[in-house]
Image (spheres, coloured by chain):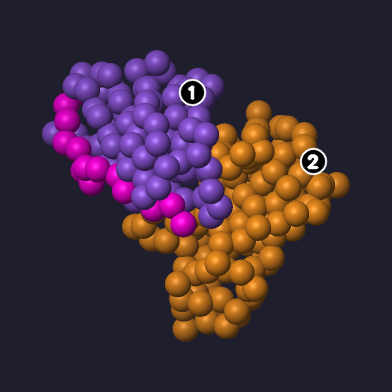
């Protein structure tokens, strides 16, 4: 059974940092591109970042470029999102999602982890 | 950036009725790269449709997708109690990949 489990969310002050993790199981992790997608409270889904299967290529939304870094450790079946210089508008539930293509649509999602940026 | 506009914002229907949800793109979505997801409160999105009309594994055949270019439709032929949820479209033809704001299908 495919499972994606996110960790690392919490309350952080503006300007602070947080690292999210997404542990994958039930599939061959190092053959899939992976994405982070976020959802602010009561709002729609917003794509954040994606990484290819071996970690050599990454892409970011303009809103997080230069502040967030996506990475992966295929030996640990884990996807990461390092978030620096956090802003109040980064408050959201962050989901990791598997891209089966790779093409940009998502067949499995984690349950999400809430990041709250507030003083 | 491709803007996706979904309509209506809310659809009030009864079980057994047909639901027709619209997703309009601000520019043509390349190569039919459009997906639909279902999301229930407190849950992660669930893939329903990819490639405009291909149903994901395990999705009942009462769900169907259609459209091309800038206009796309998700149809639920006969609503079941578990279908009351929010539905959103996503385009993945151009980066950044974007989502619609969602249509809520609620119990009338």
Q: Which x, y percent locates residue A108?
A: 58, 37
The image quarter in which residue B29 lies: top left
A11 is higher (above) or lower (below) than B43: below
Q: Kindly indicate which chain is depicted in purple in the rendered structure.
A: B
Q: Quadrant of the N terminus of chain A?
A: top right
User: Where in the figure is residue A46, as x and y percent of width and height?
Assistant: 47, 55
Where is residue A49? Give x, y as percent: 61, 57
Please report, as a chain letter, where disc 2 is located: A
Of the pair A14 and B24, the residue shown nearer to us = B24
Is B10 one of the magenta-colored residues? yes
Q: Which mark is residue A29?
A: none
Element at label 1: strand
- Magenta residues? B1-15
- Residue positioned 71% across, 32% down in the render: A26
Q: Which image quadrant for residue B28? A: top left
Residue A80 occupies quadrant:
bottom right
Left or right of A3: which side holds B36?
A: left
Image check: A8 left or right of A73? left
Q: Which residue is mark 1?
A: B54
Is the residue under label 1 in contact with that under label 2 (CB below 8 Å)?
no
Residue, x 36% and y 57% (percent of image)? A43
Colour-to-chain, orange: A
C-alpha separation, residue under disc 2 versus residue under disc 1 = 25 Å
Q: Residue at x 24, y 28 (%)?
A: B19
Q: Nearer the viewer, residue A19 or B5?
A: B5
Relative vertical location of residue B17 with respect to residue B29 in this rendering, above or below: above
Report the chain holding disc 1: B
Residues flagged by tags 2 and 1 on a common chain: no
- SS for tag 2? helix
Disc on res. A30: 2
* Residue A112 visible, this angle: no
**Structural crowding at the residue carrying mark 2, measured as other residues with C-alpha within 10 Å and reported as few (<14), some (14–19) or many (≥20):** some
């Amino acid at each position: 059974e495919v499972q994606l489990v996110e960790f690392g969310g919490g309350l952080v002050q503006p300007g602070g940092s947080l690292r999210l993790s997404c542990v994958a199981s039930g599939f061959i992790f190092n053959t899939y591109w992976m994405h982070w997608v976020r959802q602010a409270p009561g709002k729609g889904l917003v794509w954040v970042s994606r990484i290819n299967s071996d970690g050599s290529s990454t892409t970011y939304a303009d809103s997080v470029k230069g502040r967030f870094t996506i990475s992966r450790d295929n030996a640990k079946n884990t996807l990461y999102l390092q978030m620096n210089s956090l802003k109040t508008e980064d408050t959201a539930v962050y989901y990791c999602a598997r891209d089966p293509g790779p093409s940009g649509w998502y067949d499995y999602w984690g349950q999400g982890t809430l990041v709250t940026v507030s003083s | 950036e491709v803007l996706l506009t979904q309509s209506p914002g809310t659809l009030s229907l009864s079980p057994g009725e047909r639901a027709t949800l619209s997703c309009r793109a601000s520019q043509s979505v390349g190569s039919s790269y459009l997906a639909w997801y279902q999301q229930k409160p407190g849950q992660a999105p669930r893939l329903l449709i990819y490639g405009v009309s291909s149903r994901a594994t395990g999705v009942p055949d009462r769900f169907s997708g259609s459209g091309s270019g800038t206009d796309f439709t998700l149809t639920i032929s006969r609503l079941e109690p578990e279908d009351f949820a929010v539905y959103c479209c996503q385009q993945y033809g151009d980066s950044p990949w974007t989502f619609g704001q969602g249509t809520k299908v609620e119990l009338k």
